[in-house]
Image (cartoon, rainbow, N blue to C red):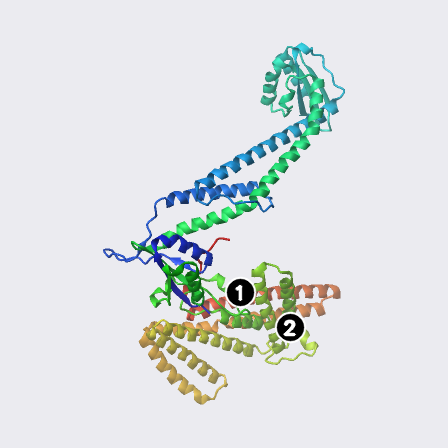
Amino acid sequence: MILPMARVQLLGPRDRLGGALTFLQAQGVLELRPPAPVRAGERALVERCATAFGVAERVARAEEALRRIERLRARLEGGRGEGEGALPEPGSEALLARLGEVEAALSAIEARRATVAEEGEAIARFSRLVVALAPFAHGLEPRQEPELHGLELRTDPEAIALLRGELRRITGGAFDLTARPLDAERTGVLLVVPRTCGRAVTALLFERGVDEVKLPSACAGKALVDVLLHLTARARTIPVEQAEVEAAWTRLADGLAAPLAASAAATRALLERLRAEDACGATRFAFVVSGYMPAERVPALQAAAARELGDRVTVLARSPEQDEWPEVPVVLRNRRRIRPFERLLALVPLPRYGSTDPTPWLAFFFPLFFGLVLGDVVCGAAGVVVALVLRARGVGGALGRDLTWIALACALSAVGFGILFGEALGEVGAHLGMRPVLLDRRRAFMGFLGVAIAIGAIHVGIGMALGIAGALRSGHRRAAVGRAAKLGLLCAAAVAAATAVDLLPAGALRPALWTGAGLLALAVGTEGPMAALELVLGLGNVLSYARLMALGLASVMLAEVANLVATTLRPVAAGLAIGVLLHVVNFTLGLISPTVAALRLHYVEFFEKFYDEGGAPYRPFALSR
């Protein structure tokens, strides 16, 4: 059913608007609506709230703070502490200042982490290079202040020869180069050049795209022995520094995880309240907050408002007028076992408020159509097993639970029709002693067609009856009379068809025809000449249900083919394998075809008679989650 809604208004002194919005946001039940527009030249009793002084600046500060908070939370992801204290008030300058301090502290930690990591990596690479090239000595004099450069080159003798030539040109021959293979593809190189030539050598390597193993700046200008001693000492101290940096990061992340999360939620709530003010009305001295909510929750809201806002704020409620129905949000409320079938309405717009919720009819007819097509005990039992296994494993979460419930209902319907038709993998059921209870659809083709069309006539007739009820509920009596006449015409046509196949006495034909003629005249008189065309279309809608017979017949014939292949094809193993494969294909098609057909018959033939789409989903003003 579509839950009855109420039009609710909160009224109070204008200076209490902020508190009222905070209260409504915490309650999370009212969908806000702005004041109704007025015609040109008229003066509205209640106008939209003018933006208060400083609100725009506060919104801008809150938006900036929220962006920075989310960036900080991403950078501090992994913090698990509860934290102490709270950040300053959302939307305040103090919060932005505090966030700036946190960002500076975090940036310093990250910069230190990057520096230490880079130095550790450089030392490790240079140490591996020195070890690979040891023993290492050079012939430069101390007064030249020898400078080390480490390289890892692709093994290429010509490249090393070119490097020697360039170094000779830059240093005038005052250099030393040692090269040894590191592996099958790389060669390690250590260069020693005078300090005065260091920049030129670095520039050369950069221009040639050579990846130089950088030494820490503290090694610049030191002798080889001093460099090695420094690297050894730093190799011991860097892990300690890295641990200290990580501990500092962890302390900061743990201390800010909870405060940042709370501040983000509070800032979002503040932004929503500030933006909600635009949907509020006001007079010179009072505010008015209007919206819609489920009528059943109004007493609880009124009690909470009296308790938290006092007697200066009043909550008024009334049922929406009929001219308001198009804007009233829609909440569907059905029993627990029917509720999963609301998922089938996701493919079409919601029904408009004040119209009919088709979910209970979907819950009955959708499995009925499915079982009528599949109609096999074994396939239905397999569907039951699959649905129960998926449901037990929790596949798909809430959506998965709903879909497996629908699948379970459809599978049980298939089992039931399989018993009525006496089918289990086609004629295998007959060999196991099963006998048709209703009909043998493998042979009684016309009987099966009659069952499908009879069910279609009932389905379409219910849709037309719902359309009559909807027209009366909306006050469209003329339309209700026209729809009732067309329903009567459908019933008269059904009586005439029943007499034609000897289901009713031949004497019923004449009254049915005279009644149909009178109802046709009534339908044309109320709805015009198009009513006659709609009658033809209605009969076409009923005949569309013959597709259920066609799909069901195709399913049972494919099962017969599978059985025939399994029993006649030689060798026996190949016949059995192909037969099983065909049954699997039939089971797969038996899941897809009736689903599509049943949905189409509901959306096109059934909904056309009464469904009034255009409902808006219910989105209450509430705290963000």
Q: In which quarter of the image is residue 151?
A: top right
Image position, residue 622 (x, y; %): 46, 56
Q: In the image, which disc is placed on residue 596? A: 1
Q: Which badge, 1 or 2, comes first in the chain's sequence?
A: 2
Given the image, on which type of amino acid does mark 1 rest? Val
- State the residue at coordinates (66%, 68%): 562
Q: In this view, does 479 lie to the left or right of 239?
A: left
Image position, residue 553 (x, y; %): 58, 72
Foreground residue among 572 and 556: 556
- State the residue at coordinates (69%, 24%): 231
Q: In this view, does 441 lie to the left or right of 325?
A: right
Image position, residue 35 (x, y; %): 33, 57
Q: Residue furthest right?
A: 135
Image position, residue 576 (x, y; %): 72, 66
Q: Residue furthest left?
A: 41
**SS of the residue under disc 1:** helix
From what the image shows, is residue 296 above or below residue 22?
below
Q: In the image, which disc is placed on residue 213? A: none
Q: Is any atom of residue 209 visible in this view?
A: yes
Given the image, on which type of amino acid does mark 2 rest? Val
Q: Is any atom of residue 617 visible in this view?
A: no
The crowd level at tag 2 (other Cα within 10 Å; few <14, some 14-19, many 20+) is: many
**SS of the residue under disc 2:** helix
Q: In which quarter of the image is residue 555?
A: bottom right
The crowd level at tag 1 (other Cα within 10 Å; few <14, some 14-19, many 20+) is: few
Q: In which quarter of the image is residue 323?
A: bottom left
From what the image shows, is residue 586 above or below residue 276?
below
Q: Name the residue under label 2.
A: 377
Foreground residue among 157 and 168: 168
